[in-house]
């Protein structure tokens, strides 16, 4: 047991002892209305003689009752009014109750928050998001309604992500109306014979209505905002289409497909090539390039497999031509003709949103019930002095290369930068990879990213991590020099071509969003709620333009929600859930992850256990001559519930899906262990990882007794 666990156990024990003593010593009887009334004159006389001391004792007693979640809070409030009058009593009760509530909140958070979040995290994610966004509002509403148990609110909110300062402030204000009612009643305590005389159905009903007021006000405010957003626009009586989708990339194509599949009339507008970034400049060309580069690398390893090869000659132009052929081969899947056969009205032109119900496409104006914006993103161009002097490449334009650059400089060590660095290096370029961060792939845990760094060094890729670019000098021919700070030194590095791979910028300009007042996030993506709707009703967003996960499969996941909510939101809406969204980096070795990694768990103060399996021990990996790798799974302490998984090694992008399925549907490692896997395959590694967890959690005492049992059966 850890020190923290022992401390929690000690605190929980002390609290239970304190609560037990309260009842054992008759505290419940003392904090009853009848007991106080029987001694009211005596107590009031003592308070009159020792006013300051009495107020302090009362204040501390109230804090203790509230902090320990003991019964008697209402009676204490009445006593405050009876002993100190309305004004002083209200001040004492208001602050004492809030401080006590905050103490209960802190205790609940310290003792139970991590355990509850880890065990029920999958179901609590929507609640946590709602609390982060509107926690103060929910708490305020509950505080106004005394029908909700005071102590229960304190304990439950301690399990949520709401900040203590917010909890204290909102509680102070929210409890004030009911506190005032009961303190005022306490000033007339002599004529009160039961709590029922105060907490009458009519009073409780009035306070409930008071508590419902914020909800009604919130609903009214939302309607007012929606009406204000729609003000000045005339809603058509007849519509040309059910939904207009702007953008023919991954998100827009899926949104259109879903709408057409449920027999809605859908218009898809794309002003460039169908398929968007993924088909034309992203996933497809990069994976085609990586495959050619891997073939060259594997051929160079021929002697490891008992083969004789005189060497590999890379025809760079032929490789890039193959990339273009691959795009053309896949293009029919995303083509205008295919989607028109599916029932989509495809228009290849520029779209401008004129109103929440109208989209101008060229000279045509389309009246639509809903709009889905899926305009994607473009390469981000960093503000580096002198960058304009060089003919730099981006992840969009690099595919136009036909001559192999001798020295290729890549700025950016995220997934795309690392993938392209290794691919071009294997195709014969001398690659230098610059990164402002000290770690390649900084999003990943260090032990998962390290094998990629080691492999890059083996392949003679020059790595400059922690490098801060200060200036670029170049020519329109593409060659130049990068100057920057590295380890306190000024370093200049030459290149023949420069490739920028520092992320992507959402495409939001020219859509008419500013005129409609559509809100943008800090990174210039379009702000949405959890249903992917903007602040303008009827306008939804999906894909890279929405973020926060800029993957093709994330865009498709969002597109389903955006399309369905746009079509059926008036009847049923679906919140988008990213808790089981996998991701992969297609370097060699590959990296794939789903759920939490150690960095994220530490950031959110989530306790976890780690189980690892060495892929170098896998029979299939040994037979294939792969260098091994690691599977790392985070689980709830003492349980097989999967919090997250990370894999570095061959075929990691394929292996991650069994963990994704398990996390999405709540399957633990025991279920994966009991699943039959084909031998010899890479997927067996999943079962071996689950076996590692099982071995670490074997019931030692039971096994010891079983050893004795079998010895007895042998006659020993």
Image (cartoon, rainbow, N blue to C red):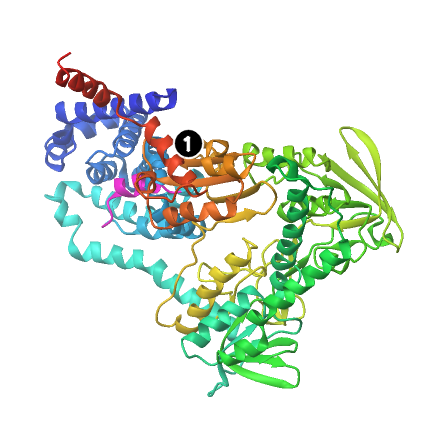
Answer yes or no: is residue 348 visible.
Answer: yes
- Residue at figure coordinates x 62%, y 74% from the top left: 270
- Residue at figure coordinates x 64%, y 45% from the top left: 414
Answer yes or no: is residue 136 visible.
Answer: no
| Above or below: residue 272 compared with residue 493 | below
Please tell me whether residue 155 belongs to the stretch shown in magenta: yes
Q: Give the range drawn in magenta.
A: 147-160
In this view of the protein, which residue sits in the foreground, 55 or 443? Answer: 443
Please tell me whether residue 419 belongs to the stretch shown in magenta: no
In this view of the protein, which residue sits in the foreground, 600 or 155? Answer: 600
In percent of width and height, residue 558 lies at 48, 61
Left or right of 218, for residue 93: left
In percent of width and height, residue 554 lies at 51, 57
Quarter assignment of residue 271: bottom right
| Above or below: residue 239 compared with residue 571 | below
| Above or below: residue 588 compared with residue 338 | above
> Residue extending furthest bottom?
238
In this view of the protein, which residue sits in the foreground, 35 or 371? Answer: 371
In percent of width and height, residue 59 lies at 30, 30
How packed mark 1 is, by other alpha carbons closer than 10 Å (few <14, some 14-19, many 20 or more), is some
Badge 1 element: strand
For the image, the number of numbered tags is 1
Query: For the N terminus, which image quadrant?
Result: top left
- Residue at figure coordinates x 41%, y 79% from the top left: 263
Left or right of 376, for residue 47: left
Q: Label 1, on which residue?
A: 611
In percent of width and height, residue 645 lies at 45, 40
Quarter assignment of residue 57: top left
Left or right of 241, for residue 461: right
Query: For the C terminus, which image quadrant?
Result: top left
């Amino acid at each position: 047991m850890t020190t923290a666990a022992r401390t929690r156990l000690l605190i929980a024990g002390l609290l239970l002892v304190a609560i037990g003593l309260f009842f054992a010593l008759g505290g419940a009887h003392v904090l009853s209305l009848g007991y106080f009334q029987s001694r009211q004159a005596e107590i009031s006389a003592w308070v009159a003689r020792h006013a300051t001391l009495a107020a302090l004792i009362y204040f501390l007693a109230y804090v203790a009752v509230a902090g320990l979640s003991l019964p008697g809070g209402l009676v204490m409030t009445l006593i405050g009014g009876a002993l100190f009058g309305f004004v002083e009593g209200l001040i004492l009760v208001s602050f004492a109750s809030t401080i006590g509530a905050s103490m209960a909140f802190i205790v609940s958070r310290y003792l139970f928050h991590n355990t509850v979040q880890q065990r029920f995290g999958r179901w609590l994610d929507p609640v946590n998001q709602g609390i982060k966004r509107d926690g103060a509002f929910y708490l305020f509403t509950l505080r106004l309604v005394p029908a909700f148990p005071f102590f229960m609110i304190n304990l439950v909110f301690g399990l949520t992500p709401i900040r203590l300062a917010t909890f204290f402030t909102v509680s102070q204000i929210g409890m004030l109306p009911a506190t005032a009612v009961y303190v005022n009643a306490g000033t007339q305590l002599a004529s009160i014979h039961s709590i029922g005389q105060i907490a009458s159905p009519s009073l409780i009903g009035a306070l409930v209505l008071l508590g419902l007021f914020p909800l009604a006000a919130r609903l009214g405010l939302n309607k007012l905002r929606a009406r204000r957003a729609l003000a000045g626009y005339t809603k058509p009586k007849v519509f040309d289409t059910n939904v207009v989708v702007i953008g023919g990339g991954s998100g827009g194509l899926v949104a259109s497909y879903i709408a057409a599949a449920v027999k809605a009339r859908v218009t898809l507008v794309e002003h460039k090539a169908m398929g968007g970034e993924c088909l034309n400049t992203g996933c497809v060309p990069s994976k085609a390039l990586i495959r050619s580069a891997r073939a060259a690398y594997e051929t160079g390893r021929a002697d490891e497999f008992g083969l004789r090869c005189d060497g590999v000659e890379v025809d760079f132009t032929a490789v890039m031509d193959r990339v273009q052929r691959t795009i053309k081969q896949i293009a029919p899947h995303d083509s205008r003709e295919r989607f028109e056969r599916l029932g989509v009205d495809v228009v290849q032109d520029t779209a401008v949103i004129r109103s929440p119900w109208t989209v101008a496409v060229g000279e045509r104006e389309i009246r639509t019930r809903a709009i889905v914006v899926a305009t994607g993103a473009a390469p981000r161009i960093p503000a580096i002095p002198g960058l304009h002097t060089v003919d730099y490449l981006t992840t969009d334009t690099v595919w136009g290369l036909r001559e192999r650059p001798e020295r290729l400089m890549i700025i950016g060590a995220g997934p795309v930068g690392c993938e392209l660095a290794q691919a071009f290096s294997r195709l014969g370029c001398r690659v230098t990879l610059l990164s402002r961060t000290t770690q390649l792939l900084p999003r990943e845990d260090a032990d998962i990213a390290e094998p990629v760094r080691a492999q890059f060094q083996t392949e003679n890729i020059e790595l400059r991590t922690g490098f801060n670019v200060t200036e670029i000098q170049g020519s329109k021919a593409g060659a130049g020099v990068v100057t920057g700070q590295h380890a306190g030194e000024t370093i200049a590095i030459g290149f023949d071509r420069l490739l920028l791979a520092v992320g992507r910028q959402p495409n939001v300009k020219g859509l008419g969003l500013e005129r409609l007042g559509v809100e943008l996030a800090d990174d210039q993506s379009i702000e949405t709620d959890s249903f992917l709707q903007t602040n303008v009703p009827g306008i939804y967003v999906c894909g890279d333009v929405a973020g926060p996960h800029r993957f093709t499969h994330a865009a498709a996941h969002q597109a389903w929600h955006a399309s369905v909510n746009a079509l059926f939101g008036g009847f049923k809406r679906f919140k988008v859930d990213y808790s089981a969204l996998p991701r992969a980096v297609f370097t060699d070795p590959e990296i794939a992850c789903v759920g939490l990694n150690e960095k994220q768990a530490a950031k959110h103060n989530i306790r976890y256990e780690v189980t690892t399996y060495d892929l170098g021990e896998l029979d299939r990996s040994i037979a294939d001559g792969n260098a091994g790798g690691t599977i790392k799974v985070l689980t709830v302490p003492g349980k097989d519930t999967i919090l997250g998984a990370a894999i570095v090694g061959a075929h990691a992008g394929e292996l991650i899906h069994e963990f994704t399925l398990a996390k999405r549907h709540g399957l633990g490692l025991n279920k994966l262990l009991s699943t039959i896997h084909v031998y010899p395959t890479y997927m067996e590694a999943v079962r071996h990882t689950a076996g590692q967890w099982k071995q670490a959690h074997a019931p030692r005492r039971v096994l010891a007794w079983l050893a004795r049992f079998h010895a007895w059966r042998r006659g020993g």
